[in-house]
Amino acid sequence: MHGTIDSAQTINQKAAREMAQSTPLAQFNPGDPELFRSDAFWPYFDRLRKEDPVHYCKDSMFGPYWSVTKYNDIMDIETNHAVFSSASSLGGITIRDIAPELRSESFIAMDQPRHAAQRKTVAPMFTPTHLDQLAISIRRRAVECLDKLPKGEVFDWVDQVSIELTTQMLAVLFDFPWEDRRKLTRWSDVATTIPGPDGLVPTDEARQTELLECAAYFGKLWKERINQPPKSDLLSMMAHSEATRDMDPKNFLGNLILLIVGGNDTTRNTMTGSIYALNKNPDQYRKLRENPALIDSFVPEVIRWQTPLAHMRRTALQDFEFRGRQIKKGDKVVMWYVSGNRDEEVIDRPYEFIIDRARPRTHLSFGFGIHRCVGLRLAELQLKIIWEEILKRFDTIEVVDEPRRVYSSFVKGYETLPVRIAG
């Protein structure tokens, strides 16, 4: 079975390379979600880094946009807040524009000084002391989840492990009703999906209807929390903080979606990616089994290798020359983390999955600068604990077929991954 999967994938990758080489650069549209669903985008970014690292796409389903594809160039855009804005009023942080009447506003889609004030509100959730407390419940839930998995039969790792554990974690962070926790998964998926006839939702309006249901559900919880003494969940923190207690509805919904997506999509897809990466690299899987202490470097390496969010977007506040290209005020500038994490000039052998890299945290998966992921230590902690528990229980978790990938050039993720644990 494995040989058939690998040979089919080799043919697909060869076809993708040939297409990327034969397509004129002027016709490149690296943000095409179909390239990500078919895992065919890599050779496009390889060519852009070499030949046109700051590339302009004149026409796409998302309109015109610039692609920044090299590690150090991405860092320069990330840290130049005077020229490149994250503000939701200008389009926000993804390649896909949301109609003004449907936009919400989160702190990741704000510029200073508002950004820092709202981010600071939730930061106490991720202090070392609080993470130590969370680690106890993360381990308990990981043990319960892994001990229920079937042996000797094929099951979907995404649904039974990745979604279940990350959704449980979110329910704890929000102190969300346990029996309704899968609503969080749904809202996260709806928030990031591209509406269409084959998608999770048919239209932007249908998407907005579901997100307003999310806001209404959390609105009830908010009223409870604001009338209770402060507690250590994210909702209570926001309800009792000066910077966030008087948020307007769009800001409230925006921050909810940011925290739900940030706590769900990224960890969930890296959790799935970790199984897939080890199956693709059996020598590294063997190395990890023989030396579980390598989990500490394996976790950041898999976060780099997976890059669960493929990009972040900025909008130019003024005309600006960057690496010889003329970016105009109002232009959309997309920083491709997925490309920066394969930049040969910064990362040694970037296409190889090496769990004992000397500097495994040299990656862009969490962003950089003021917008760096606030929950990155929690994401690493979840992955570390689940792998400690996996290695205690299972010799090998075998991937039995290729994953089905998400139709998105923002969330780089998996819909399904069929696996089997030897009985």
Image (cartoon, rainbow, N blue to C red):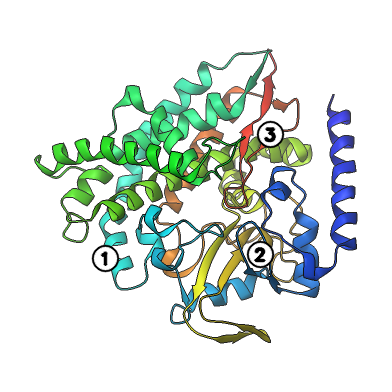
Are dots 2 and 3 in contact, CB under 8 Å? no
Q: Amino acid at mark 3?
A: Arg
Nearer-the-camera pick, 109 or 71: 109
Disc 3 vs disc 1: which is toward the camera?
3
Nearer-the-camera pick, 80 or 16: 16
Gap between marks 2 and 1 measured at Cα: 29 Å
Q: Which quadrant of the figure contains the N terminus? A: top right
Disc 2 vs disc 3: which is toward the camera?
3
**Residue 113 x %, y %:** 30, 73
Above/below status of 199 relative to 329: above
Count residues near mark 1 (Cα–Cα under 10 Å), then give few for <14, some for 14-19, many for 20+. Answer: some
Residue at the image point whose x is 69% and y is 54% from the top: 32
Quickly name the residue at label 3.
404
| SS at badge 2 | helix
Q: Is residue 142 visible to the viewer in this orientation of the structure?
A: yes
**Residue 422 x %, y %:** 70, 17
Count residues near mark 2 (Cα–Cα under 10 Å), then give few for <14, some for 14-19, many for 20+. Answer: many
Are dots 3 and 1 in contact, CB under 8 Å? no
Q: Say left or right for 238 vs 31.
A: left
Q: Say left or right for 326 vs 22.
A: left
**Residue 181 x %, y %:** 37, 28
Quickly name the residue at label 1.
117
Quickly name the residue at label 2.
340
Q: Say left or right for 252 vs 66.
A: left
Q: Quadrant of residue 37?
A: top right
Q: Earlier in the sequence, mark 2 or mark 3?
A: 2
Q: Amino acid at mark 2?
A: Gly
Gap between marks 2 and 3 measured at Cα: 24 Å
Count residues near mark 3 (Cα–Cα under 10 Å), then give few for <14, some for 14-19, many for 20+. Answer: some
Residue at the image point whose x is 56% and y is 45% from the top: 194
